[in-house]
Image: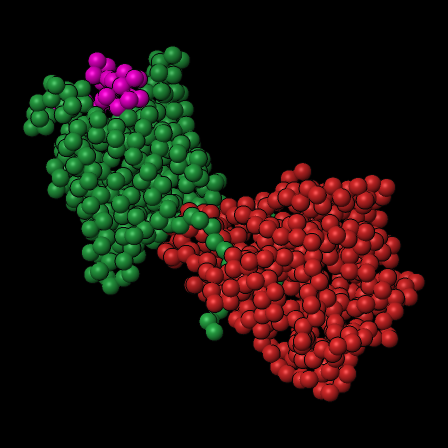
Chain colours: A green, B red
Amino acid sequence: MNLLKVSPSPHIRGEMTTQRVMLCVLISLVPTVIASGILFGLPALALISTCVVSSIFFEFVTRIIMKREQTIGDLSAAVTGLILALNIPPSLPWWMAVIGCFVAIVIVKQLFGGLGQNFANPAVVGRIVLMLSFGSAMTTWTDPKYHNTFNPLFDGYDDVIASATPLTREFPEARASYLDLLFGTTTGCLGETCAVALLIGGIYLIIRKIISPVTPIAFIGTVGLLSFIYGITDNGVMYGLEHALYQMLSGGLILGAFFMATDYVTTPITNKGKLIFGIGCGLITFIIRTFGSYPEGVSFAILLMNIVTPYIDRFTMLKPIGAVKEEKAK
Amino acid sequence: MRKIKGIHLKHNKNTASCQTEKFPIPKEVLIPMNMNMGANSEPVVKVGDHVNIGDKIGDSNAFLSVPVHTGVSGTVKEITEIHAVNGKCKAIRIETDEQQTVSKNIKPPVINNRDDFVKALRESGLTGLGGAGFPTHIKHNPSVPIDILVINAAECEPYITSDHRQMLEDSDAVIGGIKLVMKHLNIPQAVIGIEGNKPDAIKLLQDKTKSDSNITVKKLPSVYPQGAEKILVFNLTGRLIKEKQLPSDQGVIVMNVSTAAYIHTYAKTGMPLTERRITVDGDLIKKPCNLFVKIGTPVSEILEYAGCDMEKLRKLIMGGTMMGMCAYDINTVISKSNNAVLAFKKTAEKKMTNCIRCGRCIKACPLNLMPTELEKAYYRKDSTTLKKLRVGLCMNCGCCTYVCPAGRQLAQINQLAKNLI
């Protein structure tokens, strides 16, 4: 007679698993990876692979050293590595990228207890550490129009020019066109330039119900709205519109809003909280881009909002249906 | 009107078109004494006694109790103690005889007023047939006036179709029972709530109640847990049963559709509750079916009848897949509140990871609870937070556990957490 298994109800389970969630995120980034391969050539793909592999390696080793259950199977390390890779310039030396992955996986994620326990987005902190440590390498941009392995004019990465980032408003002639911003034929990090690829991935995640559209809409919307108002005060309505569109499409905003500000672990859990988070990110990004000394503020905005997430969560708790106010103890 | 949400489950109503068959009288039955919510009954027969169909074999003086009757005639062989799925209790083993004689005491009850009605309900041994097993006579004796009778025919659990078959096979009893309750409890109107995945039952009952303006049939979205009392009442009447309230505090009585039908049958025949309709299904059952079984019938015989592959059996569920209880033994018996027996070859398990804070449990909870926060508070033994987040409201519907990608046992933790507050 075989034994019957007894367990508490429910006795059926939905199909979604942590691994599947992470797999969906990886799938959603495939268009972006392809785009960066086309735009920046094979070295870009090599750099992306380096980040993914080293992130998985760091997670593997840390779990062994800490004598904890192995977790690389949940694919979260691969997601972190991939997102970090998309946040670095194509010309960044590979060893710097590996340092970024080390910071992200070992320091930000595993030392806090692994998946689900970290308070800040590992990829965001990884990027910020690289930014502060290797400032010039992290702001050396490659223009895919001239530096592409698939381009007959390609003359190697050794000859990288320190091209202006599309966000530098002082050089109007260096600014990319809207078409450039949409298809990524402009300077920028590996995965942030091609808006179309990012949007395809983002919409895929929304349709698969992996992420809620609230955060990205609030984030990008806030940046757009504030830039519009700022543009009007600067140079009239038409310029305001142009400025808003430009701000929304350029830099790491779309990548950040869809793939980093929607990280489950480090952002608020309710829709109301997500709205506050998105608006906060948008506000900080706008302030840094407009008034700060850095041309880009998406990562700092996300990190700062990560830090206040527990407070947002506390103030956006749901009211249970049927709950009555507790009577004060006399 | 705003409705409380739910989650979408695969319905698996494989037996929806299976006419209920009469299950043969088993050689012996084992009738447990704890089939209702509240106090257990005490046996009122002795070993060696001869009992006839409908004889009372157990009773109790406690307030929350109902008597137990036998559905077979035969000899009391043993009074023993068993571990039923819902706890330890006494049980009476009866060896059935050839004659199957009906007790002479069985005659329709005389009901002239509300007191007679409530007394008759108690004598019928009736408990809610939907699953919780609340004594019907207590539910039908509210101290406040009731203005709506809500009939629960949602049957939101996957697989189960016993209520559905009740409506299709004997809709007159359903309506008769509703009318009886309305008449004796002086309730002006009744609403029957049926999930949209049973269009035939909705149509049939709508046709049958055409002439009664005070009985309405309402179609409900087919989402789980539509049949949970609080949700059903809100979605049908717009009334919200608040914390620590009973449905009667909102002027409502909620009754399962099969319970209503049984009241009608009892009023007509006087035969106590000794038999019920169950659904037998699951991936190991070759012949999914609906059966009329005597209470106390061993599940092993039912499984055999339905062609269950016993070698592969790993999981046996008494009731639905979302809220039913696991049996640990195939000799478990059918009790009054069992509406299904489900046999599976695999247990649904998911690899457990850390909570990834995806918020799916919060979105899934029909009552807007925050299961992940409750779980964390439980592990810190933080009773203040548990109270603040209203863990007491959790009805263990299991939606949170079902949707959790990290495979966490959220619903179970909520039940454990209730002990901390």
Relative side of B104 to B315, left or right: right
Q: Position of residue B36 (x, y in %)?
A: 69, 69
Q: Position of residue A275 (x, y in %)?
A: 45, 37
The main secondary structure of the magenta stretch is loop
Quadrant in which the N terminus of chain B is drawn: top right
**Can see residue B5?**
yes
Q: Nearer the viewer, residue A202 or A224?
A: A202
Relative side of B138 to A175, left or right: right
Q: Nearer the viewer, residue B249 or B188?
A: B188
Whether residue B305 is in magenta: the answer is: no
Q: Residue at x 11, y 18 (%)?
A: A153
Relative side of B247 to B284, left or right: right
Residue B40 position (above or below residue A309): below
Look at the image and give the residue range highlighted in magenta: A161-187
Q: Nearer the viewer, residue A296 or A35?
A: A35
Residue B78 position (above or below residue A66): below
Q: Residue at x 42, y 35 (%)?
A: A206
Residue A256 position (above or below residue B62): above
Q: Quadrant of residue A198?
A: top left
Relative side of A48 to B364, left or right: left
Q: Nearer the viewer, residue A27 or A313?
A: A27
Q: Residue at x 35, y 16 (%)?
A: A242
Q: Position of residue B365 (x, y in %)?
A: 54, 50
Quadrant in which the C terminus of chain B is drawn: bottom right
Q: Residue at x 64, y 64 (%)?
A: B338
Whether residue A164 is in magenta: the answer is: yes
